[in-house]
Image (cartoon, rainbow, N blue to C red):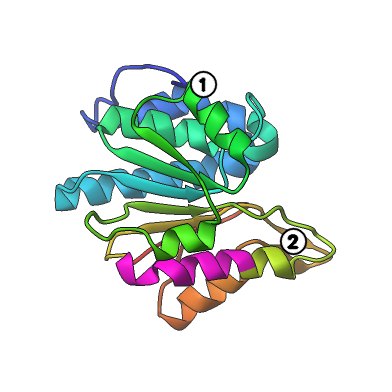
Amino acid sequence: MVANANADSRLPSSFLSTYDQHIASRVGKHRSGGFRAILTAAEQNATRTSKPILIVETGGLRQLENWLGDGQSTRIFDAFVGHHKGFLFSVDINPICAVLVSQVCGNRAIAVTADSVQFLRAFPGKQAISVLYLDSFDLDINNPEPSSRQHLDELTAVIDLLEPGTVIAVDDNTVVDGRAVGKGKLVEEALSNRGVSLLFDGYQKVWQLP
C-alpha cells in the first residue's frame, strides 16, 4: 500500500486526504491534478450510486518507485480500492507487471497478463466499471498515432459496458510546437462526438460519462 491516513473530515469515507498528504507530491505537478480529478469523480459517483468501485487500467506496474516517470497508477489505484473495498484489474501484455503487482499490491488488485484490447472485449459486464484508465502503449512524440490508436481501440472494446458516471482517463498528453500530442487525442475526438466534455485537461485527460 502507498500510505495510510485519516479520512478527510469533510468526506468521512474519502481517500483524498491520503492522496493529498502522501501521494500528490510524488507524482509531480504534471499528474497530481489529473489523479485527484479521477479519484474525486470516482468517489462522488460511488456515493451517488452506492455501487462498489471497480477500476480497470491498461498498462500495469513496470518499475517500482518510478513515481515521476510513469506515475505508479497501479499503486495509487490499489490504495484507493483498498480504502473503499473495491477492486482493480490491471492488464498488461508484459508478465513482469503481474509479478510486481503481486509483490507490492493488496489482494484487491488483480493483475492480468494479456492483450489489453482482447481483455476488454471479453470483460464481464456484471459490475459497472468506475474508472477506465488507459496507459498501455508508450507515446512516441515523433510518431504518436500508434499509441493514440491503441487507446481508442481499448475504449471502443469496452464502451458498451460503461455507464453514466464512469470516469475515463488517458495518460501522457502534451503540447509540442503548439500542437496537441498524446495518447488521448483520438479518444478525445471519439468522446467529443458522443457529447462527452473533458472533466480535466492536462497531462492526463479525464472525462466522466453523463
Above or below: residue 127 compared with residue 106:
below
The amino acid type found where label 1 is placed reads Gln
Q: Which mark is residue 92?
A: none
What residue span does the magenta drawing correspond to? 150-161
On the question of residue 24 being in view, the answer is: no
Could you say where residue 173 lies in the image, as x and y percent from the top left? 66, 57
Q: Say which quarter of the image contains residue 47.
A: top left
From the image, which quarter does the C terminus lie in?
A: bottom left
The amino acid type found where label 2 is placed reads Val
Viewer-closest of 98 and 108: 98
| Residue at image point 64% right, 61% down | 183
Residue farthest toward the bottom in the current orientation of the protein: 193
Viewer-closest of 160 and 33: 160
On the question of residue 32 being in view, the answer is: yes
Residue farthest toward the left in the current orientation of the protein: 50
Could you say where residue 93 lies in the image, as x and y percent from the top left? 60, 48
Q: Which residue is mark 1?
A: 103
Could you say where residue 162 lies in the image, as x and y percent from the top left? 32, 65
- Determine the main secondary structure of the stretch shown in magenta: helix
Q: Residues within 10 Å of mark 1 (few under 14, many from 20)?
A: few
Nearer-N-terminus badge (1/2): 1
In the image, 110: left or right of 24? Answer: left
Q: CA distance from mark 1 to mark 2?
A: 36 Å
| Residue at image point 47% right, 72% down | 156
Indicate whether residue 210 is drawn in magenta.
no
| Residue at image point 30% right, 17% down | 6
| Residue at image point 39% right, 70% down | 159
Above or below: residue 1 compared with residue 153:
above
From the image, which quarter does the N terminus lie in?
A: top left
Q: Which residue is mark 2?
A: 175
Viewer-closest of 91 and 206: 91
Indicate whether residue 157 is drawn in magenta.
yes
